[in-house]
């Protein structure tokens, strides 16, 4: 039985939406940030537990020998139990303790707020990367779509003119010029095929797919002019850009750090209660003891009196630094939005003129074909038609690409709100 050739892998047809979803699902950075978000959420849960009273339940059985009147104190891990001298060698204890802090200068609440802000910050970071990954996938999709259209257009023209070139004169100045023009067309066709292969690799890399994956794109390189308001884009960027929210979260964290530093010098008040039953041997009567305690603790430290305020001043300096970073991030985002908007407006203004030029070129060349024109004029006309069509495709691509860049600058999908 003869060997059979291995079948090529099935080709995957992907739309723009498929590309964005695959890029998001395959992004290692997004997966790691998702785990960071989960870690931050668990820290919020841990901080919430600080609001509840602490309850301890302890039971011991001890076999002992105590000589004289000297009592024996068990290890704290076994419960702080004192065993006194007794003829019985078995000692049993059962104890329950509860303690609740009622005032500590807002320390517990601020710790919870820190954990909550850190969680929101982790969510914001993941959203920022998701927008960047989606934007990169869109740009790679449009780049590959344009490269495919260019390569297809060059191949169609080259195929149409190949049979025509076989009849072209070769021993004349016009024939030399035609050969030169046709050779240039062949080179451009090869360059277009190379650009398509490179765009395909960049597309697979943007989607984090295997670089030998066979894919084809579903969709057309078309667009429609959309009127966008710059002030609205700037307002959306202030609302949605995760990088700006990151600096806001840092400001809040530093402000809470100041409060926590001040709270370290704040007295704490708490209530506690203990109940214990103990006795020697199971058959003996046991005693029940209880205690209720009001605890007031005033932290006083010689070092804090003289050097403790350095930590507060450090926190305040960090807060001022975060404020400056927020202003810097805001200026940078404003610049990015204006830059992307300028590029978008340019390509939108080019759509109609280039489309009109392409249609006029199509009409002129169709008229020349009807006259069965030959020679260098026919070759240059076909080349002119090809270049006019490619310029229009570049305008469409530039418009779509600029829209994707503007979405990344704004930090939000514009199609959801337009």
Image (spheres, rainbow, N blue to C red):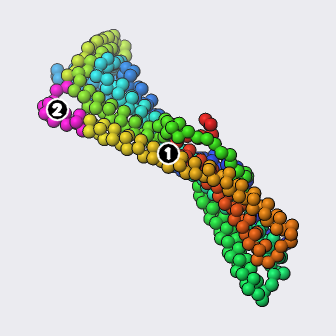
Q: Is residue 134 left or right of residue 289?
A: right
Closest to the observer: 367 or 147? 367
Quadrant location of the N terminus in the rendered image: bottom right
**Number of on-image labels:** 2
Q: Residue at x 62, y 65 (%)?
A: 198
Residue at position x 26%, y 31% from top? 261
Tell me which corner region of the image, top left, top right, bottom left or bottom right, holds residue 210: bottom right
Q: From the image, tell me which residue sits under label 2.
A: 304
Q: Position of residue 55 (x, y in %)?
A: 37, 21
Which residue corresponds to the image point at 76% horizontal and 71% vertical from the top-left? Answer: 158
The picture places residue 192, in percent across and down from the top left corner, at 67, 67
Mark 1, residue position:
337
Whichever of callouts 1 and 2 sits on the residue coming sooner in the sequence is 2
- Report whether 118 appears left or right of 178: left
Q: Does the magenta segment cover residue 342?
A: no
**Residue 40: where, in percent of width, then height?**
45, 36
Q: Which residues are magenta?
A: 299-314
Magenta segment's dominant SS is helix
SS for callout 2: helix
Residue 382 visible in the displayed image? yes
Nearest the camera: 55 or 193? 193
Answer with left or right where residue 82 lies relative to residue 307. Answer: right
The reply, left or right, for residue 30 in relation to residue 382 is left
Q: Is residue 214 visible?
A: no
């Amino acid at each position: 039985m003869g060997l059979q050739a291995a079948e090529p892998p099935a080709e995957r047809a992907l739309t723009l939406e498929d590309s964005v979803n695959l890029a998001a699902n395959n992004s290692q950075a997004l997966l790691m940030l998702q785990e960071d978000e989960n870690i931050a959420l668990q820290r919020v849960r841990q901080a919430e537990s600080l609001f509840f009273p602490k309850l301890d339940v302890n039971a011991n059985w001890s076999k002992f020998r105590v000589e004289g009147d000297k009592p024996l104190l068990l290890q704290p891990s076994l419960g702080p139990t004192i065993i006194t001298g007794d003829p019985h060698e078995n000692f049993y204890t059962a104890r329950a303790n509860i303690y609740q802090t009622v005032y500590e200068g807002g320390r517990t609440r601020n710790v919870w707020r820190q954990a909550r802000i850190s969680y929101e910050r982790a969510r914001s970071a993941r959203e920022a990367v998701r927008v960047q990954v989606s934007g990169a996938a869109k740009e790679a999709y449009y780049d590959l779509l344009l490269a495919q259209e260019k390569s297809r257009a060059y191949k169609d023209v080259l195929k149409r003119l190949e049979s025509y070139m076989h009849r072209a004169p070769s021993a004349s100045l016009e024939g030399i010029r035609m050969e030169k023009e046709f050779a240039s067309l062949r080179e451009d066709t090869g360059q277009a095929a190379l650009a398509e292969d490179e765009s395909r690799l960049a597309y697979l890399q943007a989607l984090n797919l295997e670089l030998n994956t066979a894919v084809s794109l579903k969709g057309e390189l078309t667009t429609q002019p959309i009127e966008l308001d710059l002030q609205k884009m700037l307002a959306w960027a202030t609302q949605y850009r995760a990088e700006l929210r990151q600096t806001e979260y840092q400001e809040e964290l530093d402000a809470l750090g100041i409060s926590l530093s001040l709270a370290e010098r704040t007295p704490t008040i708490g209530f506690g209660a203990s109940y214990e039953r103990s006795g020697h041997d199971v058959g003996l009567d046991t005693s029940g003891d209880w205690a209720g305690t009001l605890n007031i603790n005033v932290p006083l430290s010689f070092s804090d009196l003289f050097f403790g305020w350095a930590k507060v001043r450090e926190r305040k300096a960090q807060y001022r630094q975060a404020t400056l970073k927020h202003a810097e991030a805001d200026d940078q985002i404003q610049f990015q939005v204006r830059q992307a908007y300028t590029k978008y407006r340019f390509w939108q203004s080019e759509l109609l003129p280039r489309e009109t030029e392409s249609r006029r070129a199509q009409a002129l060349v169709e008229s020349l074909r009807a006259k069965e024109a030959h020679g260098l004029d026919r070759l240059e006309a076909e080349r002119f038609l090809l270049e006019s069509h490619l310029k229009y495709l570049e305008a469409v691509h530039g418009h779509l690409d600029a829209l994707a860049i503007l979405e990344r600058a704004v930090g939000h999908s514009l199609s959801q709100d337009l």
